[in-house]
Amino acid sequence: MAKLAINGGPRAVPEGMLQPWPYITEADKQAVLKAMDDAMATLKFTTNHPAVRGLEDGVARYVGSRFCLSANSGTAALHMAVAAAGLGPGDEVITSAYTFLASASCVLHHNAVPVFADIQPDTYNIDPASIEAHLTDRTRALLPVHIHGMAADMDEIMAIARRRGLAVIEDAAQAFGVDYRGRKAGTIGDLGAYSMESSKLLTSASEGGLLVTDSQEYCDRARLVRLFGEGEVGGDKPRDYNALTMGWNYRISFFSAAMGLSLLNRFDQVRSAWQANCGRLSARLAGIPGVEPPFVPADRSHGFFIYPIKFRPERLGMEVPVRPFIRAARRALQAEGVPVRFWQTKPVPGQALFQALEGYGKGCPWKCHHRRPGLRYDPAEYPVTNEVISRSLYLLKMSGFNPPNTPELMDRYADAFQKVLVENRDELAVLVKEEERTEK
């Protein structure tokens, strides 16, 4: 039995075996070069560039949405959705305590107030029961997150929204192409937003975002926000430089659009490969004590933008604190060549932004006279979120799920878990003791 790599043994995953994401082909490169040529030949306004229009039309068809607007980031697309839904000062928007900051900061961007709900312990998605518990007479919208690429319980969420007359904005930044009961994540609520950042499922290899909706009204409002509050230029219509509302410059670059459109053309092929890889890894990890692979309900798919792994040292017969165990396992697995890492380290409402309540300065929007008095954020109010964070390590999208990586890499990852958690448990216990001493 080989000793752990962290103690001088051989790595379970050979150096150089992992191939990076994005997986860029010659077709992608040619698409970007053509976009440059098109821009120089036509001198069209960016939002009218053929690659931009092609991406928007292609995404709308793929997800089954009436309208799609591109943006320069997923965060911008979320802000456009918040503005399009008519949210503003004092309006409360319920989102998940376990997510990336943008799910909440997009609400702040339009002077509305985020309120946080706890999550479910199996899918890590926002818990409809916790949404119900956080409703107030100021709640105007729900912003569920399809976390890690796992679709949230949208039927239950939509039922709450319709009973209360609330808008629903889906944060599908991590979940492009993910299925939920026959529909695509991002198309079930009133508006949805995707990210095309370099690590995402439908990537631009740089930055980008997408907003989808079936509402002409919401689309028109979002389009104003995207371009300085002006009506966008198209055809022979001259630009009148007249802002009709508050607006930003959220236009996507034609480089990003061209790359995204090129990947869209082979998206299902790429998605099938990474889902097969992740399925292989899950099957192997399910047989290793002390770890839990992601749970996937039968009525939806998982995009595996992030592959969360929950650790339970007690099932290894190790009566040790979870935090030093997680840190020791991370060190040992990384030395074996498995790129596990931490993700969120605290509930979003526990971040300094929401503890200081300074916002834009002088406490806005929390001190705005439109807001609900006395709103504060206590991280301890989200026990499931805290539990998930304390027990989890993560493999991100660039961890080798994508082609040309194969199931062989997944087997190597699983071998590393077996080596660290089972075959060399005594060595792992020593590492845990080291972490305990460091913590003190």
Image (cartoon, rainbow, N blue to C red):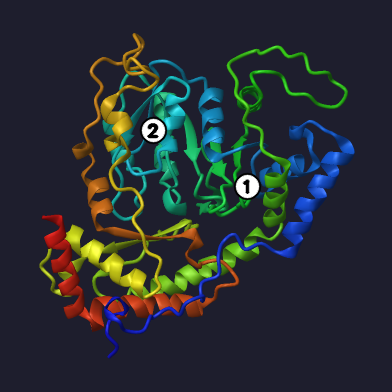
In the depicted view, which residue is nearer to us: 235 or 45? 45
Q: Disc 1 designates what residue?
A: 63
Quarter of the image for the N terminus: give it: bottom left
Question: Which residue is rendered at x = 64% and y = 18% of the image?
Answer: 229
Q: Secondary structure at mark 1?
A: helix
Q: Give the residue type at disc 2.
A: Ile
Q: Quadrant of residue 25?
A: bottom right
Image location of residue 64, percent across then percent down: 64, 45
Q: Quadrant of residue 10?
A: bottom left
Q: Is residue 389 above or below residue 353?
A: below
Image location of residue 417, percent across then percent down: 32, 75
Image location of residue 169, percent across then percent down: 49, 34
Q: Is residue 191 visible?
A: no
Q: Is residue 124 visible?
A: yes
Quarter of the image for the C terminus: give it: bottom left
Question: Which residue is rendered at x = 15% and y = 56% of the image?
Answer: 439
Q: Is residue 184 above or below residue 92?
A: below
Disc on res. 79: none
Question: 143 left or right of 32?
Answer: left
Q: Is residue 429 above or below residue 172?
A: below
Question: 309 left or right of 421?
Answer: right
Image location of residue 386, percent across then percent down: 23, 47
Cα distance, mark 2 to mark 1?
A: 24 Å
Disc on res. 160: 2
Q: Is residue 58 above or below residue 112?
A: below
Q: Give the residue type at disc 1.
A: Val
Q: How packed is label 2: few (under 14 Cα within 10 Å), some, or many (20 or more)?
A: some
